[in-house]
Each structure stands twice: as structure tokens, then as C-alpha cells.
Amino acid sequence: MGKGVKAAVIGGVFAVMVGGAGYGTYNLISALSGDGGTGGVAAEKRTGPPGKDEVKETTAKFFAAWQKGAAATAASYTNNDTAAERLLTAFGDDAHITDVKITPGAAQGTTVPYAVKAKVAYDGKSKPLSYRSKLTVVRGLTTGRALVDWQPSVVHPALRKDDTLVTEQSATPPIEAVGRDGSVLTKDTFPSLGPVLDALRDKYGEKAGGTPGIELVVRHDGDGAPDTPLLTLAEGEPGKLTTTISPSAQAAAEKAVKRFAQSSVVAVKPSTGEVLAVANNRTDGFNAAFEGQAAPGSTMKIITAAMLIDNGVTSMNGPAPCPDTAVWQSQTFKNLTNMKPDENATLASSFMRSCNTAFIKLIDEKPLTDASLTQEAEERFGLGRDDWKTGVVSFDGRVPAVEGPDRAAGAIGQGQVQMSPLNMASVTATAITGAFRQPYLVSPELDGREPARARGLRASTAAQLKQMMRLTATQGTARQAMAGLGGDIGAKTGSAEVDGNAKSNSWFTGFRNDIAAAAMTEQGGHGGDAAGPIVAAVLRTGG
């Protein structure tokens, strides 16, 4: 290490001491020497939460070593020195971050916030870097020492398990993603699109014709996700990539999901399969709208109703009695609280009221088998075959052929059935048009992708499903959420219980003219409570 660098580091350490955090000269010298402050005398093993002085001393030593670039020494002040040393080494060697200065804020118990200022320098290019993070000091289980509780976010708040920091020529050129109207889509305008834009760049950066720049990125080694750019040292030349996104629908989706935590929504154009909007309100950056896998609750009754009609079990105006309970192979199924039984109910009536027992009682009718629902989902709705090519990673739904109680549970969207909002938006699109058109975000013509295909529905089946969804939106469980929407509208509500959760997940799917949307909110309650208003807000834009 050169003299200039050493001087900068020492200056940074004194800034920590003088900056109001109250670290004494003793702690500073200990931090630089790495002797642990014991003076060679064995200290009695301590127990209980670290005290105020211990928190100050441990963080001072950790910060001082980190600023010096002494990864092994800094890691020794954590409770996972192997993982800490790897990431702290990459901080300097792979990310090329130098001139580090850390300024701690006031401790809140054992948690210490801090600001990091540094420089990123690579291939003759450099830029300042600044960010804030925090750490927590805990008691070492075996030593009793006060140690930094190691999390990757200690190094940078964007880091998660198995992530690392790298500065280099970008793996793929940047893209200028544009919507269906030609307007530019950015993370600043549409924050929820961030993971999608990163994924599009990772896949289409070279095809779009751009040239790479130099970037500091988060590399997600654990799950194969595309790099997340943090700082651009040298701009590349972006290539233009046209998407199917409707800026007006996307803006509505972004605003709508913000109303409820852990929410996701997708909108598609039924006549083409184009994705008009995709938005998530999550803290983990996961694109649950496309990749989520969860029981869809009673929105699954769209597929179940299609199965009953296609197999001649009943029809929209045919019988579908709705008793209080239904028993399937010793398991009892019930309806929502306060739902009045109706032994003379039609399928349309039971559908729009979302009567579970009506569907449970009918799945035992001939010619239905354990595989009938699976066949309907795969052959008519294009689900569960792992062949969708949307332009980014997506889940294709799962409707396994099962026997026993799970066969009955699957008919009402529980058991082993799993869907994403993208899947359910597609289900609605198929139900109202009769044709399965695989959703896509980027035209298949760009890279020669072959979209998934399915038989679709008979015209009479689609007509009945569409009418039942209309009734649900105007007279049934979706009436309140869809109130005020004009045009041709329809919907289906759903709620799915999840073990260990106090409230059920809220599901809702609906259409208005040539736009279909579906949403899911974790622990959002009944379908109309949270997911319903999200879908209605997106449908209101008209795409």
C-alpha cells in the first residue's frame, strides 16, 4: 500500500473518532493494531447483549480495518469471518473500490447506521461512490466477544446472500427500452420495472445493437439473476429495445400496488397476448408478477368451470347446488362465512357467489378423472407445460394430476395448484376470447422464439365463462371492486389460505374490453379486499 493511500486511511479513521461517535484513542489504536484490546490478559467470557462501550469498540475496529482494506482483519470482528473476508476482499479486488471513509451515526441500541464514501477506479475511469447502510453487534456464541452480525448488506445495502460486487466492462450493452407508444421506459419513471429492465438487458443487450460500458454491479451468483448496476463509470451505447408495455397501464399498475404490501399485478391484451403492465411492491426485488408460485384460490374456478362445461357435467344455467359443506374422501370443505346454501343454484350462481361446495360436489361426476383438471389447464389454457417464452423468466403455472383430498382442493385453487398473476391474467384472456395466446413482453420476432400453443376453448364454453365473469363483476363477489368501470367488464375473486398466515392471500382477475389483469396480495384477505382494487385501477386505464 502506498504512502498516499495509507495517509488517506489514517485520515478516515480520525474522521470516525472526531465525528461525534465517541470512539476513544484506545479504541483507535486497538483497531489499527488488531490486538483485540485485551493486553494479552485472558478476559472473562461475557454473556447477554453487548453493552454500549462494546458496540463502539467493535464497530471502530471493524470500520478501521475495512477502511485500510484489511479484509481478513475486518472479518475477524464478525461472527462469520469466512463469508465476511470473501466479500470484503471482493470490495477492493473485484469492485476496485478505494479511498474508503466510513462515518458512523448514533447507535440505536446495538444497531449502528453509517455512511460510506469511496472511489471506484477501473481502466482509467473513476467515479465517487456513496451510500448508507447499517450493522448490528451481537454476542459471539462461543467466544462471548462482541462481534458484527455478518450480513452481505453490511458491505452494501443492495447485497444479499451469495451476491458480490464487481467493476468491469459490462457483460451486456445497455438498452433503451421503449413502450408500445415509443416512449422510453426507465427505472426512475417506473421503479417496479427495474428487475424486468435488468432481465431484458441481460437477454437482449447484444441483440439490440448497443456497446458495453464500465459499471460497478451486484453480481447475483447464487440464483443466476442478471447483474444489478450500481454505478456507471463509462457509458456504453444503448441499443433500442421495443417492448409491449403500455406506459399508461404501467403507471396505473405502479401506483396501485403501492397501496398494499407484497402485491403484484399483470395486465395483458387478450387479442394478442401482449403484456401491457407488470408491477410489484416487494422489498426483495423478486418479480412475483411473472415468477410467483402460489395457490390462486377461487380464481381457479374459471378453469374448473371450463372443465365441467367441456366434459358435459353441467353448464352455465345447469345445476351446481351450493350446500353448507361438501365431503370429499373424508375431508370436509366449507364456504365463506355467512354464505347462504342454495340447493337449486346454477353454475353461474355458484360461480358468481364463489361457492366452494358446488365445485367440490361436481368434480366426482363422470366422466371426470384425477387428470381432468390437469388436461383442461394444459390443453385449453396452455398452463403447466414449461414452454412459455415471454422474453424474460416466467412461471407457467402448475396443475398436477392428483388423487385424494388434493384433487378436490385443486378445483377451488388450493392443494398443489400454483399460479402467478401472469398465469391468471392469461387464463382470463383465454376465457373471454376462447383462444390461448401466450403472453409476451418482447416480440418473438426479435430472437425467433416459438410461443407456446394450446387448443383453446370451444366458442360455447368461452361465451359461458365470459358471461359468468360479467355476472360476478356486476352482481357477485367482484361487484364492489369493479364498481364504476364502464364497457364490457367481468371478474373473478379468490382467496387462498396459507399455513402459518393469519390472513389469506387476496387474488383477483378481471377484464374490461380488450384488457385483462390479475393481481395477488400476500395476506390481503378476500379477493375484493386488496387484489380487487389493484386490478380495477389498471383496467380503468383501458391499456
Image (cartoon, rainbow, N blue to C red):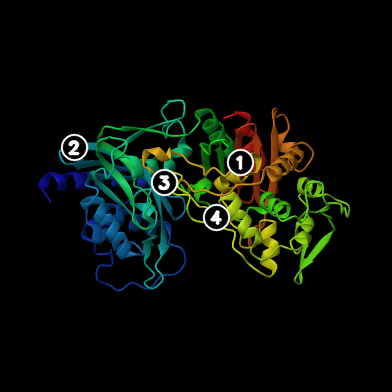
Q: Which one is earlier in the sequence, the residue at label 2 or at label 1?
A: 2
Among the 4 quarters of the image, the one containing residue 425: top right
421 or 272, nearer to the observer:
272
Of circles 4 and 1, the one toward us is 1
Q: Are marks 2 and 1 in contact (CB under 8 Å)?
A: no
The amino acid marked with disc number 2 is: Lys
Q: Are marks 2 and 3 in contact (CB under 8 Å)?
A: no
Q: Which one is earlier in the sequence, the residue at label 1 or at label 3?
A: 3
Give the label on residue 125, or none.
Answer: 2
211, above or below 164, in the image: above
Give the label on residue 429, or none.
Answer: 1
Give the label on residue 69, or none.
Answer: none
Q: Which residue is mark 4?
A: 293
335 or 398, nearer to the observer:
398
Mark 3 secondary-structure assignment: loop
323 or 152, nearer to the observer:
323
- Whole-angstrom CA distance, mark 2 to mark 1, is 50 Å
Mark 4 secondary-structure assignment: loop
For this view, does 543 lie left or right of residue 306? left
Q: Which one is earlier in the sequence, the residue at label 2 or at label 3?
A: 3
Q: Position of residue 12 (x, y in %)?
A: 24, 45
- Whole-angstrom CA distance, mark 4 to mark 1, is 19 Å
Q: Quadrant of the C terminus?
A: top right
Among the 4 quarters of the image, the one containing residue 121: top left
For this view, does 146 lie left or right of residue 462? left
The amino acid marked with disc number 1 is: Ala
Q: Position of residue 520 (x, y in %)?
A: 60, 47
